[in-house]
Amino acid sequence: MSRWENDDISQLGLPKLPDREEIFLGADADTVVESKAFAKIVSNKSEDKKELRFYVRFGRGELLDAHRMDKRIDEKIYKFKKVSRATFDLYKKYLSTKNLLHFTHARRSLMGE
């Protein structure tokens, strides 16, 4: 154990690290584990503010189609990519309704970012 691991650093005035929470959404927009997720929300809460970031899984240069071709997720190939809230909301609507129109709108929204 290093000597400085137990030192009190409260008097240094360092900001408190934000609390981080990740919520993973599966093919039906329900909460799942990361390995089965198609989208995620990352929430950082600090003393004075709360920040939300939105991510969707990508593969082959575009959004994954959770209900058709891309039902199986290979974590080595498909990575989360940060998107706007508008794109995320459209993709989440696609996951919950399975309506391909929402998937198309999410892809178009992504091109405008």
Image: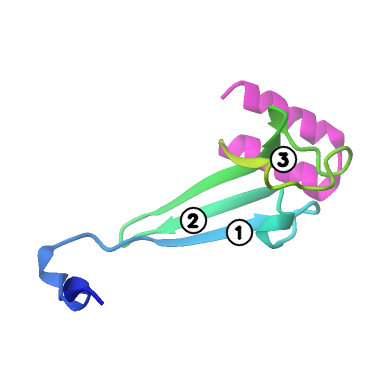
Circle 2 crowding by C-alpha within 10 Å: few under 14, some 14–19, many from 20: some
Q: Nearer the viewer, residue 73 or 90?
A: 73
Hey, which quadrant is residue 55 in on the image?
top right
Asked if residue 78 is positioned above or below residue 31 in the image, the reply reads: above
Q: Which residue is mark 1?
A: 23
Hey, which quadrant is residue 88 in on the image?
top right
Q: Nearer the viewer, residue 11 or 104?
A: 11
**In this picture, which residue range is highlighted in magenta?**
84-113
The tag on residue 43 is 2
| Residue 32 located within the stretch drawn in magenta | no
Asked if residue 67 is positioned above or below residue 9 in the image, the reply reads: above
Q: Residue at x 72, y 45 (%)?
A: 92
In the picture, which quadrant includes the C terminus? top right
Name the spot of residue 28 as percent of width and height, x first: 80, 54
Q: Which residue is mark 3?
A: 91
In the picture, which quadrant includes the N terminus? bottom left
- Report, in whole angstroms, how far the alpha carbon at label 2 lies from the one at label 3: 18 Å
Question: What is the image's colouring?
Answer: rainbow
Q: Residue at x 55, y 59 (%)?
A: 22
Magenta stretch, main secondary structure, is helix
Name the spot of residue 95 as percent of width and height, x first: 78, 46
Taking the image as shown, residue 84 lies to the left or right of residue 90, namely: left
- Report, in whole angstroms, how far the alpha carbon at label 2 lies from the one at label 1: 8 Å
The tag on residue 80 is none
Asked if residue 40 is positioned above or below residue 104 in the image, the reply reads: below
In this view, the residue farthest toward the left is: 11
Q: What amino acid does circle 2 point to?
A: Ser
Circle 3 crowding by C-alpha within 10 Å: few under 14, some 14–19, many from 20: many
Disc 2 and disc 1 in contact, CB within 8 angstroms: yes
